[in-house]
Image (tube, rainbow, N blue to C red):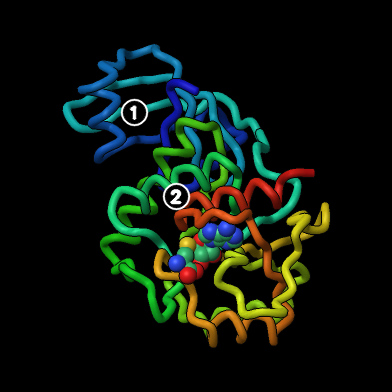
Amino acid sequence: MANRYYIDQRVRLSSEGPTQVTLRGSVAHHLIHVMRVKTGAHVVLFDGSGAEFSSQVGRVGRSDVELTVLQRNVIDRELPRRVALAVSLPKGDRQRWLVEKAVELGVAEVIPLATSRSVAQPVQQALDRLRRAVIEASKQCGRNRLMAIAEPVAWSDFIEATRNEPQRLLAHPPSVSPPGTRHRHDGFPEPAGRIVVAVGPEGGLATEEVALATEAHWRLVALGPRILRTETAALVMVALANAR
Ligand code: SAH
C-alpha cells in the first residue's frame, strides 16, 4: 500500500469545506526529500482512528507540507476478534521484527512481560522505538488502527489483571512441563470472542510462573516437540487465535 502517511493528530473534516492539515517532522521530511512530492499529488493519510483520508498536496515547504483533506473513508482492516499478545520480548532486532509481524497479523495489543528470566525490559526509549515500528508497519500493511504497546508488566500482575478475560492461552513446551501437566494438543481456541495469548522468554518461564497461570485457569498450549524461539511461538499463537 503505497503513499500512506501517518498524521499524529486526529483529522476532523469540517462541513464548511475542505480541511487543511500541515505535516511536519519526519513524515514531512520523507514526503519532501524521499518521495519528492509535488503540489497536486494525491496521498492517503491515516490518523489511527480507524479511518483513512484521501488528500491532495498543496504547498510544499522546506520542512512542512500542506495538504487538503478531501474525503474520510472508514476502512476496517481489523480482525473479527480482539487478540492481545503478552510476550517476554526477545533482544535487539528480533523485538522489532516481532512487533512488525504482530501488526501485520492484526494483533490489537502487545503487552511486554517481565518474567524471572526475561532478557531485556524495554525502557521508555525502546517502547517509543517499538511504537514507531507500529506506525511503519501500519503504513505498509494498510491498518488504520494502531496496535497498542502496553507498558511492561510483571508476570504475577499480568496473571491477576487478566483474571476475567474469557480466553487465556499460554504457550508452554511439553518437553519442560512437569509430569501430569494438561496441554491442549489440538491447540485451537474457541472460534470467537476476545483472547489473550502469552509466550515466555528465551530462558523459559519458571515452574512457579507456569503454576501461577494454571492456578488462574490459563490453558497451556503445546506447539510441537521442538523448542521455538519466543517470536516464532508468538506468531504461531496469534495465527492459532485467528485460524477460524
Ligand atoms: N528453554 C525454554 C524454552 C523457551 S522458548 C524452556 O525451558 O521453556 C520461549 C517460549 O516460547 C516458551 O516460554 C514458550 O512460551 C514458547 N514455546 C517455545 N517452544 C514451544 C513449544 N514447542 N510449545 C509451546 N510453547 C513453546
Which one is closest to the eye, mark 1 or mark 2? 2
- At x 61%, y 85%, the residue is 211
Task: Give the quadrant of residue 160.
Answer: bottom right
Residue 202 visible at all: yes
Residue 109 seen anywhere in this rendered image of the structure: no
Mark 1, other Cα within 10 Å: few <14 / some 14–19 / many ≥20: some
Number of residue marks = 2
Label 1: which residue?
Answer: 66
Q: Which labelled disc corresponds to residue 99?
A: 2
Most extreme residue toward the right, as rendered? Answer: 191
Could you say which quadrant of the image residue 32 lies in? top left
Q: Which mark is residue 36?
A: none
Question: x%, y% of residue 173?
Answer: 58, 64
**69 over 144 or under it: above or below:** above
Q: Whole-Å distance between the Cαs marked 1 and 2? A: 31 Å
**In the rendered view of the protein, which quadrant contains the C terminus?**
top right
Q: Label 2 crowding class (10 Å Cα cut-off): few <14, some 14-19, many 20+?
A: many
Q: Position of residue 117 (x, y in %)?
A: 38, 76
Amino acid type shown at disc 2: Val
Instruction: State whether residue 113 is above or below residue 24.
Output: below
In depth, the one of 167 and 11 nearer the eye is: 167
**What SS does tag 1 mark?**
strand
Report the residue at 25% width, 38% height from top: 26
Q: Are marks 1 and 2 in contact (CB under 8 Å)?
A: no
Q: Secondary structure at mark 2?
A: helix
Camera-side residue of 60 and 145: 145
